[in-house]
Image: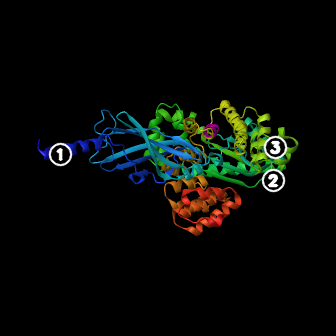
Amino acid sequence: MNKKLIFSLIMGGALVLTGCNKKIAQFDSNYFSVTPEPLEVSANKVPGTVTGKIPAKVFAKNAEVTVTPTLSVNGTELSSLPYTFQGEKVRGNNPTVNYEKGGYISVPFSYDYQPNMEDAILYLNFDVKQGKKEYTLPRVKVTEGINTTATIANVATTAPAIAPDKFQRIINEKYSADIKFLINQANIRDGELRSEAMQSFNKNLANASADNSRQIKEINISSYASPEGGVEFNEKLAAKREKNTSAYLEKHLKNEKITNFGELTAQFTAQDWEGFQKLVSESNIQDKELILSVLSMYKDPEVREKEIRNLSSVFDQLAIEILPQLRYSRLTATVDVIGKSDEQIQEAFENNPKSLTIDELLYCATLTNDNNKKAEIYQTAANIYGDDYRAFNNLGACQFVAKDYTSAAANFKKASNLTSNGEANMNLGLISMVNGDYNNANEQLGNAGGIDALGDALGVYHLKTGNYNAAVKAFGDSKTNNAALAQILTKDYSKAKRTLASITAPDATTHYLMAVLGARTNNEQMIISNLRQASKLDSSIAAKALKDVEFTNFNLSSLL
């Protein structure tokens, strides 16, 4: 055999053996990259993808390599789903990496977020099956550190919805009565003064005058003439009716010694076409559409009257049913009912809470900033008015603020059972988020439409479920740590800074978020000053910051 041919066969066999039987060398960490870099928490998960570029003549033709992303957290290892890749000589359905050309691999992973994951390390473990051989390659470190900024979102700081009271310090009441006149007359008949309406009006005036909690603000007289009879005649007639009614009322007030009223005003309307149109439109008169069309066609009062009189078939009916109702003087008294002062309500709560209405009790709770005192007031309201959902909902809100979530949930449920209401639905959604049940939270929040406080609750829900743009939209102009966090996560740093600066009672979280902003905008002085302030308010902040990848590129030694 030709020596050259023999040499070629030997070399070819050697190459085959090299491509198939030689063990795979250790994978280099430079082969791999990870997205995102650094890893970050989203929707209570740590997701990502490792991409590997395998060079030529590395991946054996007959090898199957199972890659398992493994997260090392404080001495504990968490494994994600393994993925298997194969050489071109392997019969199987796994992605193939070519020996001669090399190739790419992609390994997605996801871990449930756990507290204190900030300095976790991501490794790749390799298990190889090559023919009958099975062996493990040294693991490769891919990345270190997890950005946990999204976990700052805090359901507990979200204000629960308070069912509002309907307390009004001043309630406006109006009393009225009509004095009817005969056609073309202005004298007041005794029968009109003895009518039930006038008797009730006079009694209400007297009662209001004698009651220190009521104040007569105004008494008004409006006198009218029906449209027929001509403008000039009706003007004089309506004016005389107004004069006679005023004279009667002034005499009555004097006789009853009612002097504590604000103002007595009077006016008259010569031809009450507006009242005429209203009464006709509400009537059952057969030709009312014809009458209304005349009113719309002619604006001059004299022409109107003439055209309506020409409707001889209906004018007699108008004279009987409509026109008499337009010959009157209306007396109206405006009275302010003055409710209890804040001091009176608070005193009544301490001494005799049963003397207060439900709305006075609910209002009483708004007069203190002490959450325990609020809870006491709402508990009292629930005891006295057990059928009003607002007492239970608001008591639950106080318990939520105090982080007594079991009691809060029970009272929100009571409020919901008493009547369907948005406040309890929203608050039950907050409880679901505290418990990590975001599906139920979504349902409850969806049933809370129209509640003013809903925006912040929805914002936190979207933060917790990883939809940061929706969170920003839900928060709107809210000035809270959670709202600023949503803006940071969507990289609207200018708006986030304005939001944090507008928080009326900044806490440790406020300053920590300011420090994060400093890191993301390369402002080291902003980082240090805010972390120092945050550490004063919460001594655990310094240790957290030292592990936070947000500050990896900055020297925080001064915090130690």
Whether residue 449 sits left or right of residue 182 in the image: it is left
Q: Which residue is mark 3?
A: 207
Q: Which stretch is magenta? A: 423-432
* Residue type (three-letter) at the residue carrying disc 1: Ser
* Residue type (three-letter) at the residue carrying disc 3: Asn
- The reply to whether callout 3 and callout 2 are in contact (CB within 8 Å) is no
> Measured from the top left, where is residue 548 in percent x and y?
57, 56
* Residue type (three-letter) at the residue carrying disc 2: Asn
Q: Which residue is mark 2?
A: 260
The picture quadrant where one finds residue 392 is top right
Q: Residue furthest bottom?
A: 525
The verdict on residue 484 being magenta is no
Q: Nearer the viewer, residue 266 or 163?
A: 163
Front tag of 3 and 1 = 1
> Measured from the top left, where is residue 139 in percent x and y?
46, 46
Quarter of the picture holding the C terminus: bottom right
| Residue 176 visible at all | no
Q: Nearer the viewer, residue 392 or 261?
A: 392
Q: Nearer the viewer, residue 462 or 412?
A: 462
The verdict on residue 431 being magenta is yes
Q: Which residue is mark 1?
A: 8
Structural distance between the alpha carbons of marks 3 and 1:
124 Å
Magenta span dominant secondary structure: helix
Structural distance between the alpha carbons of marks 3 and 2:
12 Å
Q: How many dots with numbers?
A: 3
Q: Residue furthest right?
A: 351
Helix, strand or loop for disc 1: helix
Q: Is residue 550 above or below residue 350?
A: below
- The numbered mark, 3 or 1, whose residue comes first in the sequence reads 1
Q: Is residue 93 above or below residue 49?
A: above
Whether residue 70 sits left or right of residue 15 in the image: it is right
- The reply to whether callout 1 and callout 2 are in contact (CB within 8 Å) is no
